[in-house]
Structures are given as C-alpha cells and as structure tokens.
Image: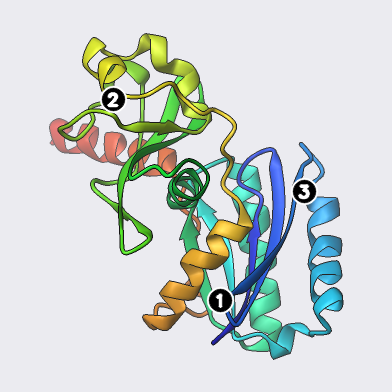
Amino acid sequence: MAKILALDTSTDACSVALSIDGVIQEDFRVIPRQHTRQLLPMVDLMLSSAGLQVKQLDAIAFGRGPGSFAGIRIATGTAQGLAFAADLPLLPVSTLAAIALKASREHNAERIVSTLDARMNELYCCAYEMRDGLPQALDKEIVSSPENIVLPEGDNWFAAGRGWIYLDSMSAAVQQAVCAPELDIYPAAGMMCELAVAAFARGEGVSAEQAQPVYLRDEVSWKKVADQKKKGQ
C-alpha cells in the first residue's frame, strides 16, 4: 500500500496526517491564524517521527476547499512545493467530503449534509451518502444563503459542520429533515488521508501544476458576471 501525506488548513484547524500501508497518524490542532508558521514544522515532525523523507512518499494530499480562501491557498501552495521538489503526484481532497467521512466514523451517520461557514451569511454545502465505507456526493458543492438550501429527498440527515449555525434561517423543510447539528466537525487531514488512499488506488493523482484549489464563491461571482454580459448583448 501507499505512503501518503495529507495537509489541511481550510478552517481554524491545522492538521497533518500520514498514512503508511493504511495505518494513519494525525496531528490536529485548532490554531487560528497560525497556519503559515505551524504547517511545515508539523509536516517535518510527522515525517521525522516515521523516519521518512518527502521523496520516500508516494503522494501528497491536501484540502482543496471549499473553506477559508487564505487557508486553502496555504495548504495548496505547501503541497505543490513539496510535491514539485520530490516529483510526487498530488491528490486534491474535498473538505466537505472529509467532514462527511468524519461524521460517519464518529457518529455512524449514513446520510450526511456537510457544511462550512462561508461568512457573509452564506455557507458551503454538499449532501453525501456512505457507500462502501466512503462518502459519495449526491449533488454539487455549493455556496448559498441559508434560505436557499434544498436537501435531497428523505429525512434524518446528519447535519455536520459549522455552516449549520444558520439552521434557524433555513426553510421549515430543511429544519425538519435534519438531526440536531454537530457544529464542531472540522475537515481533518486524517480523514483526507483515508479519502486520498482510495483516490490514489484509482489513479487520480495529478501533477503539482495541475492541482487547483476550489473556492466556489469565486466561481459563483464569475458566473454572475458572465450572465450579466450575456444579458447586455
């Protein structure tokens, strides 16, 4: 099996994990505004504890978003730098999928709506269903105002992540379809390692140049501008 390092700085949490033949070690810290200073020392500590150098890894995974714009850039840039220097493939991992996997592991959840607080009275959101032990997205990741959130059919959805602070602003249908939210489920590198191992086995690694962050809000803004241009033609 593969040796994969994972990094995440998409929220106030900063985490590093290492999977060696499927056994995962993780360093997880909630350290707001310290990611730039702490991430590389955490990587060095993780690798030295395992007696490994970066070039001995098979791949590097990172939380590609959505999440904090600055945080996503830190993890993406660090992963790209490490991978480029060691000629390793990168595995971009969804932060919302990592939340869903953590909800499944810690709460036995099978149908999960993962969220993150996107600020400006908006949230990042995606619904997942556990299949063969891994979360499968049932729709696209979105950034949305709370009142516009719509869930797939069914009830007893497990509500995971900080975006559920906006629950009271959501529709009655959404409020009735979810369980009491678990707000303090962060994306974590340990979960990303598990997702990355599966992605690596499927041959989904990309080069450092090809690895891109996912912001969502930038994409929405671009679409709005494009639509306005079309209307003006």
Residue beneath the point at 84% across and 70% down: 44
Q: For mark 2, what is the residue?
A: 149
Cα separation between marks 2 and 1:
34 Å
The quadrant of the picture occupied by the N terminus is: bottom right
> What residue is shown at x 49% (from left), y 74% (from top)?
197
For mark 2, give the secondary structure.
loop
Left or right side of 113 for 59: right
In the image, residue 33 sits, relative to residue 131, either above or below, namely: above
Front residue of 122/59: it is 59
Give the quadrant of residue 143. top left
Residue 83 % position (x, y): 64, 79
Q: What amino acid is at disc 3?
A: His
Q: Is residue 10 left or right of residue 217?
A: right
Q: Position of residue 67 (x, y in %)?
A: 54, 42
- Displayed quadrant of residue 179: top left
Image mark for residue 35: 3
Q: Classify the position of the C terminus by image quarter.
A: top left
Name the amino acid type tagged 1: Ala
Q: Nearer the viewer, mark 1 or mark 3?
A: 3
Is 146 displayed left or right of 63 in the figure?
A: left
Q: Which residue is mark 1?
A: 208
